[in-house]
Amino acid sequence: MRPEPKLGVAGWLAKSFLRSKLTPIVVLVSILLGVAAVLLTPREEEPQIIVPMVDVMVSFPGASAAEVESQLTTPLERRLWGIPGLEYLYSTSRTGAAFITARFQVNEPLEPSLVKVRQELEAHPEVLPSGALRPVVRLLTIDDVPFLTLTLHGGDLPAGELRKLGEEVAREVAAVPQTAQVRVLGGARRLVRIEPDPARLRSLDVSLAELQSALQAADTQLPAGDLVEAGRRTELEVTGFIHSGKELGQVVVRAGAERPIYVQDVATVVDGPEPEPAVILVGRKGETGFEQGVSIAVAKRPGVNATALARRVLHKVEALRGGLIPKHVQMDVTRNYGDTANEKSNELIEHLLIATLSVIALISLAMGWRSGLVVAVAIPVTLALTLLLTFLFGYTLNRVTLFALIFSIGILVDDAIVVVENIHRHLHLPGPPRSFVRTVIDAVNEVGNPTVLATFAVIAAILPMAFVRGLMGRM
C-alpha cells in the first residue's frame, strides 16, 4: 500500500466536501444568494467615485470683468491653493461676479472638503475687495448630475403658466423617497419688478433709499411677544404680508402731511413672468416647428438604485395625468439613466452567462462531460458568492464591476482546468488500485498549493493598478 500523503489545505477541503451531504446545500444556497444579490444590488452606469467639487460664487456689483479678475478672482485663487487635498482650480470672471470651482483629490471626504473652503474664506476676509458681497459656497458631487429629466410641452400654454405647472409637478416628484435635488429648467418664472419713476420720485421728494427701506420692512419677520394662557406660553412672530404685486404697491413709503405715499405712487409694480426667460424648445422627428417646454431634472441620493427610483418617479408622474397635468400637455422622458443603467447591466450579465456557458461547452468537448460539469458548478458558485460580497460591501452593479467579473472568469476556469486535468491523469496512472475518493483527494492535494500560488501571482501582477492615482486609478 502506498502511504497516504500529508494533506494540505486544498486536499483537506476536497476531503471535507467530496462526500459531505452539506455540499449540494452549500452550492444551492450560494447560487440563490447570488441571484438575490443581483436583484437587490443598486444599478448604475458608472461606479460611485468620490471627487469633491466645491463651487464658490462671489458677487462684485459694478466691477468689470477685468476688475473682477485682478481684484477678486486672482487673490481668491492664491488663498484657496493652500487648502490640503486640493487638486485643481477652475475660475471664471464675469462682469459683477467671480465663479471658482475647487476640485479635490479622488476619495477626499465630502463634508470636510466643504468645511476647509468655508474656513479658509471666513478666516481671511481681507482677500475680498471693498464692495464684494459674502461668498456663496456649495458642494457638488457626481450624484448632483440629474439621472432623470422630464419635459412638459404643448397645450399652447404661455411660458409663465408652463413654468408654474412644472414647479407644481416638481414638488410632487420631490416627495418621492430617495430623490435629492429636483430642479425646474426653462419657462418664465414669476417675477415682481419694481420700476422707480425718477420724475415721480422728484415731485414727491422721495429717495431710492426710502423706497428700499420700506420694501425691506414690509417683508420682515419680527418677534411679537408671548401669549400666556392656561399656564402655557406661546411665542408670537409677525411675518411679512406681501403676497402679490398689488399688495406690494400698497406699501407705505412715507406718511405725508396730507396723505401717505405708497410704492405705486413713485414706481410701477409689474407682477408677471420674467421678461427674458430661459427658453427650452421641443421638436419632434418628422414635424416642422418647435414649441416651448419646461424640463424637470431629478437627482438621486448616493448609492440609490437608479433603475428602481426612475420607475417610482415615472409612476408618480403618470398618476398625475389628467389631474395636475392636463391631458393636452405632453410629457416626454428626455433622460433616463436608470433605464440605460438597467439595460447595460442586463447586457453585461448576459455576456457573463454567455462567457460561462462557452467555457463549459469548450471544457466538455475537450475533457468530457464530467470535467465540464465541475466547471459548470465552480464558476456560478464563485461568481454568486462574489456578487453577494459586492452587495454586502455596498458596491453597485455598473460597467466596471461587471467587466471585472467577466475578467475573473479566466482565472476561475484556469484553476478548474488544472485541478480537473490532474484528477483525470491520476485516474489513469498505473499502480495499485485506489478508490475514486482517494484518487480525487490525492490529485487535488498535489496541485492545490501551486494553483493557489499561481492565483496569488496573478493578483500580485494586477495589484500595482491599485496604486494608480487620480480618477483613472479609481476606475
Image (cartoon, rainbow, N blue to C red):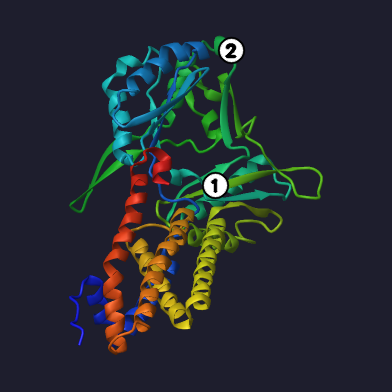
In the image, 184 versus 271, the foreground residue is 184
**For mark 2, what is the residue?**
198
Q: Position of residue 217 (x, y in %)?
A: 41, 27
Q: Position of residue 259 (x, y in %)?
A: 51, 20
Q: Position of residue 384 (x, y in %)?
A: 39, 70
**For mark 1, what is the residue?**
297
Whether residue 257 is visible: no
The three-letter code of the residue at mark 2 reads Pro
Say few, some or many: other residues with alpha carbon within 10 Å of mark 2 (under 14 / 14 to 19 / 20 or more): few
Q: Earlier in the sequence, mark 2 or mark 1?
A: 2
Q: Secondary structure at mark 2?
A: helix
Question: Which of the labelled discs sits on residue 197, or is there none?
Answer: none
Position of the N terminus by quadrant: bottom left
In the image, 453 versus 234, the foreground residue is 453
Residue, x 55% and y 58% (percent of image)? 344
In the image, 81 versus 169, the foreground residue is 81
